Amino acid sequence: MRIDAIEGISNTYEKLGVNNKIEGRKDFSEVLELALGDAKQSELDSKLSTAELLAGESSALHDVMIKAEKSELTLNFVMQVRNKMIEAYDQVMKMQV
């Protein structure tokens, strides 16, 4: 009975077409900036659709409510990221050198 050698992980990645290089990755500040931009845009969309509903230009109350909830969820997510960043900063500052 013949037992073949196990292929290395890098060979498996190559066969699957997975690129193991760091090319095209964004650093944390860029990702955070994009998330804040999305939160701001979501809030503006919510305000615009609310204003359109109040002005009588739109009769789709459900769309307005969906946009408002999306804006609220996005804001809550950004706040949680901020809280985690502050918590991590506090932990780093408490470390003894």
Image (cartoon, rainbow, N blue to C red):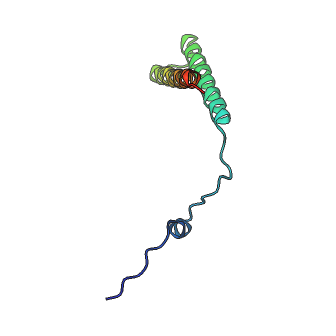
* Residue 48 x/y as whole percent: 61, 18
- Closer-to-camera residue (2/83): 2
**Quarter occupied by residue 92:** top right
Q: Quadrant of the C terminus?
A: top right
- Residue sitting at x 50%, y 23%: 80
**Extreme residue toward the left, this view:** 1
Quadrant in which residue 17 is drawn: bottom right
In percent of width and height, residue 68 lies at 50, 20
Residue 6 to residue 60: above or below: below
Residue 90 lies, with reference to residue 2, above or below; the image says above
> Residue at the location (47% across, 24% down)?
66
Image quadrant where one finds the N terminus: bottom left
Apparent side of residue 5 relative to residue 85 in the rendered image (left or right): left
Coordinates of residue 8 in the picture (x, y in percent): 50, 70
Q: Please give the count of numbered marks on the rendered protein.
A: 0
- Residue 42 percent coordinates (x, y): 58, 25
Residue 35 drawn above or below residue 11: above
- Rendered residue at 55%/25% (across/down): 95
Q: Residue furthest top?
A: 54
